[in-house]
Image (tube, rainbow, N blue to C red):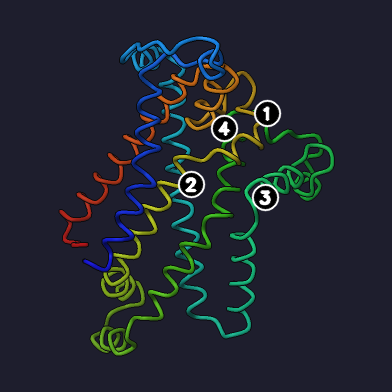
């Protein structure tokens, strides 16, 4: 524990001050005039939170964010786990090609990847419409189809982390354990669910928490692929909504309040998930 103390102090220091500033700004009327020094700060207490919770758009954006993040997390876990199992069963050359392709997706900058996906699904020149024979179809017009397209791009750039993590876990499982289960008559499905999965559970917990944090606060993909939140804000998520309120609306206090709410929600989701895992028998 003492070895972790310096890193822990540094981490707390790096996180505590920005969070304190975020919380402090959310308690003030803080617009462009206050930011430029042309007007004094006005303490308004919880007024920003009251305005936020009284805005119906906030609740619709919050629901959309939760559903969008859930789809991305589940998709990343399923694709990453399936490819990790596949990588553990194929030979060296196909495995190397699989990892190169996955790491290429992981290393692609979010903005570049978003524009590549937009080009692939372009209504006039996109390869997908050419292959499907749906020339002229707009994938970014409808709310659901737009969210689905963005979610697919997020899963594409997120599954490599799950894949690499679980592949390392699978390769660390002693072969004698799997062989003993097979000698006892366990099927492949029984071996996977009753032997391999419990061993990989700590890694799955880590991958899930990381995916929740990443996908809940997605910004770049949604902003780029929906042109700032879609038609009439139909494809807003909380991070883009906060950006619009803070910078486009020049209300930094309200934007900070959204940031505080997002931080609290992420902490609650993480704690609830860990408590659920602990109740089911896993100890960190």
The residue at the point 39 percent across, 22 percent down is: 26
Residue 177 drawn above or below residue 255: below
In the rendered image, which residue does mark 2 sit on?
Answer: 72
Q: Decide: marks 4, 3 in contact (CB < 8 A)? A: no
In the rendered image, which residue does mark 4 sit on?
Answer: 144
- Please report whichever mark, 2 or 4, sits nearer to the chain's N-terminal start: 2
Nearer to us of marks 3 and 2 is 3
Q: Decide: marks 3, 2 in contact (CB < 8 A)? A: no
The residue at the point 51 percent across, 9 percent down is: 39
SS category of the residue bearing label 4: helix
Q: CA distance from mark 2 to mark 4?
A: 14 Å
Residue furthest right as drawn: 125
How packed is label 2: few (under 14 Cα within 10 Å), some, or many (20 or more)? Answer: many
Residue 135: x %, y % from top left = 81, 39
Q: Is residue 160 left or right of residue 203?
A: right
In the rendered image, which residue does mark 1 sit on?
Answer: 141
Q: CA distance from mark 3 to mark 2?
A: 16 Å
Rendered image: mark on residue 113: 3
């Amino acid at each position: 524990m003492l070895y972790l103390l310096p890193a822990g102090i540094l981490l707390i220091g790096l996180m505590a001050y920005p969070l304190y500033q975020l919380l402090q700004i959310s308690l003030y009327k803080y617009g462009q005039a206050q930011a430029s020094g042309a007007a004094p700060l006005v303490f308004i207490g919880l007024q920003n939170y009251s305005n936020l919770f009284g805005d119906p758009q906030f609740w619709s954006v919050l629901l959309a964010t939760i559903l969008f993040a859930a789809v991305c997390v589940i998709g990343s876990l399923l694709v990453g786990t399936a490819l990790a199992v596949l990588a553990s069963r194929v030979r060296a050359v196909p495995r190397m090609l699989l990892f190169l392709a996955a790491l290429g997706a992981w290393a692609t900058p979010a903005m570049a990847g978003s524009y590549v996906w937009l080009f692939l699904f372009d209504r006039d020149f996109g390869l997908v419409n050419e292959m499907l024979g749906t020339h002229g179809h707009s994938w970014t017009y409808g709310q659901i189809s737009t969210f689905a397209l963005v979610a697919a791009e997020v899963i594409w750039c997120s599954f490599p982390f799950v894949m690499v993590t679980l592949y390392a876990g699978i390769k660390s499982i002693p072969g004698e354990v799997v062989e003993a289960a097979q000698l006892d008559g366990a099927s492949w499905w029984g071996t996977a669910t009753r032997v391999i999965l419990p061993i990989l559970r700590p890694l799955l917990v880590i991958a899930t928490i990381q995916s929740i944090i990443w996908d809940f606060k997605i910004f770049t993909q949604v902003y780029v692929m929906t042109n700032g939140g879609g038609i009439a804000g139909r494809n807003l998520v909380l991070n883009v909504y906060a950006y619009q309120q803070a910078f486009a609306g020049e209300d930094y206090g309200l934007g900070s309040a959204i940031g505080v709410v997002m931080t609290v929600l992420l902490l609650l989701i993480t704690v609830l998930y860990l408590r659920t895992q602990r109740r089911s028998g896993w100890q960190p």
